[in-house]
Amino acid sequence: MRLLHVMLRVGDLERSIAFYCDVLGMSLLRRKDYPDGRFTLAFLGYGPESDTTVLELTHNWDTSSYELGAGYGHIALGVDDIHAACNAMAERGGRVVRPPGPMKHGSTVIAFIEDPDGYKVELIELASRHQAA
């Protein structure tokens, strides 16, 4: 077994695709409209679905926003240089909501960026993660 994808419901599909592709560097892998159901699915990721876990964005045509819910946490991405990654993402229009630094009660260096719908994306510096393990 392996994790295939994580799904987020988004209010503005084009805005979300732009964020995940332009700010976080993912690629749009596939997209399909379902007119009878009035929704569109877009799959994005850092590699092919056959090899990597991807992000599914679901846009229900008649819904422009969602309450995020108390059970949702975040998506996590590994980065080699967290300061450079945050700077680059901010330059591309990303909103860093927690600057790079050690996690509370630990030494792993993390940061958080927020997508256009308010979902949090955690950045984890891979070198510090391996040192802390």
Image (spheres, helix red, strand yellow):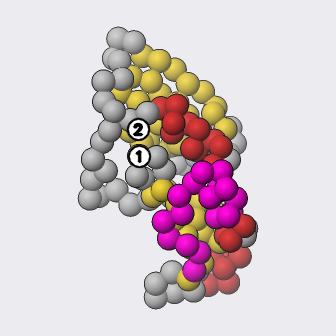
Q: Amino acid at mark 2?
A: Val
Between residue 111 and residue 37, name the one nearer to us: 111
Which residue appears at 36% of the width and 23% of the height?
A: 61
Which residue appears at 27% of the width and 53% of the height?
A: 69
Going by the image, does 19 lie left or right of 118?
A: right
Residue at disc 1, secondary structure: loop
**Image vertical order of residue 106 relative to residue 130, above or below:** below
In the picture, the quarter occupied by the C terminus is bottom right
- Residue 94 picture quarter: bottom right
Label 1, on which residue? 117
Give residue 18's position: percent from left, percent from top. 59, 38
- Tag 2 near tag 1, CB within 8 Å: yes
Q: Amino acid at mark 1?
A: Asp
Which residue appears at 54% of the width and 48% of the height?
A: 2
Using the image, tell me which numbered label, if any, was put on residue 85: none
Answer few, some or many: residues within 10 Å of disc 1's Cα (few below 14, many 20 plus, some between 14 and 19): some
Q: Say if the magenta span includes residue 97.
A: yes
Magenta part of the chain? 85-101
Using the image, tell me which numbered label, if any, was put on residue 10: 2
